[in-house]
Amino acid sequence: MTAQAGKIRVAVYPGSFDPPTHGHLNIIERGAHVFDEVVVTIATNTSKKGVFTPEERMDLIRQLTKHLPNVRVEGFTGLLVDFMSKKDYHVVLRGIRTVQDFEYEFQMALSNKHLNPDIETVFMMTDAKYSHLSSSLIREIVMLGGSTKGMVPEIAEKALREKLSPKK
């Protein structure tokens, strides 16, 4: 995709990524082919206690996307629309796995549009082989001593095991 009217088309892919899964990377990589730049934003969710700090998540995503020159990683707190307004970003990229995801993301997109009419949301279907993956499922598998091979990148699994594996 080429820039239109001198504007670089930037898509913001927000999330907690705790941990990043192959499903997340699927959306990032495909988004990097569609948009001039993808900014992965690590949200600090005040209602959730994360396994990884926002800085650790940003570091994991940077390691996992270093092969993609048009992907950047940033952190933010507060409303996504405020972050995007400050940076003059206008497109939110969201991955959809299930109908339930769509219902939730549809509400979020409408709320964001209400808060800032200049923001558009683009939905991208996750590759079917990753549609069952969620960060909470991955955390539970690791806490119970199971294998997440093929579900998360090796460096993410290793970091997660260091944090969550049952103590022997």
Image (spheres, grey):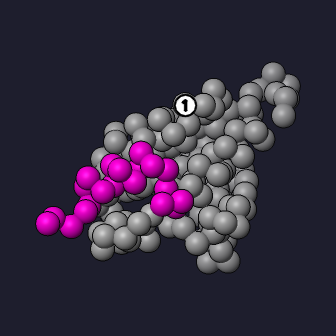
Figure quadrant of the C terminus: bottom left
For residue 146: magenta?
no
Above-or-below relation of 16 to 66: below
At horizontal 34% and vertical 66% (from top left) the residue drawn is 142
**Magenta segment range?**
149-168
Neighbourhood count class around disc 1 (C-alpha, 10 Å): few under 14, some 14–19, many 20 upward = few
Q: Nearer the viewer, residue 108 or 33?
A: 33
In the visual, does 24 lie left or right of 128? Answer: left
Residue to which mark 1 is pinned: 66
Q: Locate residue 132: give its quadrant.
A: bottom right
Above-or-below relation of 105 to 52: below
Residue 96 in view (yes/no): no
Figure quadrant of the N terminus: top right
Q: Nearer the viewer, residue 114 or 132?
A: 132
Residue 20 in view (yes/no): yes
Q: Nearer the viewer, residue 11 or 20?
A: 20
- Where residue 149 appears, as percent x and y from the top left, is 48, 60
